[in-house]
Amino acid sequence: MLEVKNLRKEYGPLVAVEGVSFNLQPGDIFGFIGSNGAGKTTTIRMLSTLLEPTSGTASLNNADIRKDPMDVRRMIGYMPDFFGLYDDVKVWEYLDFFAAIYQVPTKQRADVIDNVLELTDLTVKKQSFVQSLSRGMQQRLCLARCLVHDPAMLLLDEPASGLDPRARAELKELIAELGRMGKIVIVSSHILPELADFCNTVGIIEKGQLLAFGPVNKIVEGMQPNRVLSAKLISNHAEAARVLTDLPNVLSVEVAGDGELRMDFNGDHEQQSELLTLLVNRGFKVIGFREEHADLEDVFLKLTTGAVQ
Amino acid sequence: MKAATWTQETFATYFNNATAQRDFRVQLRGGRSVLLFALYLGILILVGMFVYADTAGLEQVSVVEAQDRLSGFYSVVMWILGSTVVLVAPALTATTVVMERQRKSLDLVFSAPVLPKYFLVGKMIASYRYTWMLLVLALPVTATCVVLGGSSWSDVLVAYVLLSMHALMLTSAALLMSTLAPKPVSAIIWSYAIAIVYLIVTSITGMGLSFMSGGGREMPFTTALSPFTVTSAADTFTRILSMEVPNWILVTLFALAVSKLFILAAGAILAPFGSSKDVASLRVHALLYLMAVALYFGYAGASTVTTTATSAGSVDSGSNLGRMLFMVIGPLFIILPLLTCYGMDGESRFWPNGIAKVKKTLNGTPAGALPFLWLIVLGAATALYAGEQLGGGGAISPAYLSYVVFALGFWSFFWSLGRMTSAFLLGLRSARTLQFASFLVIAILPVPFLSSIQSSQSNWRANEWVWDYYILRPLWVDVDRSFQALLYGAVLLIGSWGIAILAENVCKRKWLP
């Protein structure tokens, strides 16, 4: 279990991370969302014990990042937003080096290397030089490196950046598989649809402050307590808007540029159906009627627009 | 349990180091190293053939001349090996860490349970092992010298030990430069600069001390510190407490201590998290080594720091010891900017955390700079005095205490200038450079300037007062200047405190919210 308590990092007058707190359980895949410079990488570097927090702390399975950094390092696999690969070594040598520094017993190393290569689908490249791998393969090799010591937690900083769609899909599947294996996975990214696909928990950070944390659907619901309905008419938009505004469950109505009516609605499905019937009965020519679902991107934009002064 | 863990970690660091294994594998990969080895062996064989041709007609010359020629052959081979060490050790090591930083692989290594020591020792072993391979490859040629009678096996063995120790020192110095430098080119340049300075200093002092000791076997161990004097220094010794200690043993101890200090310094720079432990270890070691040097100087110089007569009266032995204190801690000016300045530069960020806090003495933050400086001055002063007492010196003199105050004032003053430059400039490098420049301007540059003013007058002795404006004036040995030392020390202390407070105010306005 990961417990992050009031993690704070200051660089002189600049507060890079301000009191970030959250908890994660084994199997959680946590999407860490934020714009560039929001504090994602700083937080991840603190969790990976590469950066000392100014105050606050975090503990992974009761090992404190400040007091027992070596114990924490044994339990984490850190993949930064750059590869940092050694060009002049073969794939198996690269993994063997990291297995050695993670103190994997010599006798087990060959099997461990074979296993992680299989998991990351790189077995055929075992004897290849690292520089001969494609970008996607290098990314998978980095992930394989993080797995040689079977860590309890993976810290992946922008793992999908620069990858082609196919490599991204493969990486997503791999991360989901790691979550199913019971590992805590923290993935930072600013490509939100990607995170929403496979993360069961997300956190939104802006200017060093964690603005939201929790399961994706709860955060979205929390940000949008009322449903948004949209109706497309052929004509008489203004008249329809006036009619809708008078209805008890309609909180507000706006006419979009393309003539679509968007309304905040706090009724249930029965009342939604009655609303459509009313429009049709009043003679409005309805050609489309649907409920709009907010996504992570909407929530992120809503939260981060002027949220932190 | 702790002993078992320590043994396991030490074994892993020195005998089963993954960094060393990987680097060595890469070094020997491909045809490059084979070509280099072949070239190196070719040169050695050529030299061997030339000398063999020279010695082929030895039956026609006298025994003395034949012996000279054979010894000359041995010296040439050792000179080549010395050059190899000087050229190869920095070249192999200088890029090792800086390349990792450029490749951004350091984060990957230090997010694993790896201490900087493990990583650095691994880097050092890989480079050092390669240099050793070159020395071992030369063994057949060296053996020819023994077979022909140019030297003995014991000479060769001692010479190899000395060469390996020089290689170790140059490797560790290059490793430190590699850790400090932002680019591989600057790491190489600085590593060779250090090697050249080391060679010049050790060769000059070696030759000088060898000449002063009349060419006998008893010589200070510093004569054996040059890679080009291994043949002549191999059988020399230093007398310590009436025991003849072979100089190669002292050189070995010296090399190990210096290498450890360099590795600790590199470790303190690299340590990504909880670095205060590494910095504390470095500072404690540096202090202890400095105290050992001061003890040695106090002991060795006990006979020379007695009261000396001058044209203007006599100079107290305490004053002489005080001047020696300045000599011992003089090299501090090189590391002073690293100790005192703060600011940001790339990944290095040292933020102001107060003027002076005793609790921070060993942890490397700006607030610990002054207490550590004082600790160095007082530690060296105590050890120097203890050394003098061991060598048979007299009771403590008030003059010595005056010089201790002067030393405190002198270094505090430059510390305060470091704080001032840091307060005005945001960049750490700029602050450090400016502080170093201020030292040169205040302590070094006035010497030629004031000399020219003084000598411009026909009666140059009458113009000697110009030196009273020089910060190091109390170090002059013409008369007893202990009171002047006390006065200068007090003024510098007060001045440094004023500058530090001013710098703190500037800092608060500029840096803090």
Image (cartoon, rainbow, N blue to C red):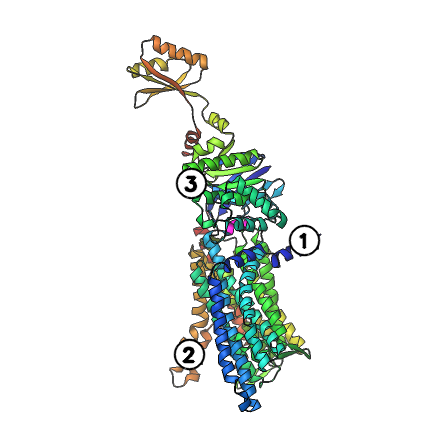
Q: Is residue B259 above or below residue A157?
A: below
Q: Nearer the viewer, mark 2 or mark 3?
A: 3
The residue that disc 2 covers is B451
Chain of the residue on which disc 2 is drawn:
B
Q: Magenta stretch containing residue B386, yes or no?
A: no
Residue drawn where x is 45% and y is 73% of the image? B469
Q: Is residue A66 above or below residue B451?
A: above
Residue A256 shows which numbered tag?
Answer: none
Q: Nearer the viewer, mark 1 or mark 3?
A: 3
Q: CA distance from mark 1 to mark 3?
A: 43 Å
Q: Which residues are magenta?
A: B106-111
Q: Amino acid at mark 3?
A: Leu
The residue that disc 3 covers is A163
Image spot of residue B198 (x, y percent): 50, 72
Residue neighbourhood size for the residue with mark 2, other residues' Cα within 10 Å, grouped as few (<14), some (14–19), many (≥20): some
Residue B5 shows which numbered tag?
Answer: 1
- Name the N-terminal-most of marks 1 and 2: 1
Q: Magenta stretch containing residue B109, yes or no?
A: yes
Secondary structure of the residue carrying numbered label 1: helix
**Considering depth in this image, is B492 or B247 the residue closer to the camera?**
B247
Chain of the residue on which disc 3 is drawn:
A
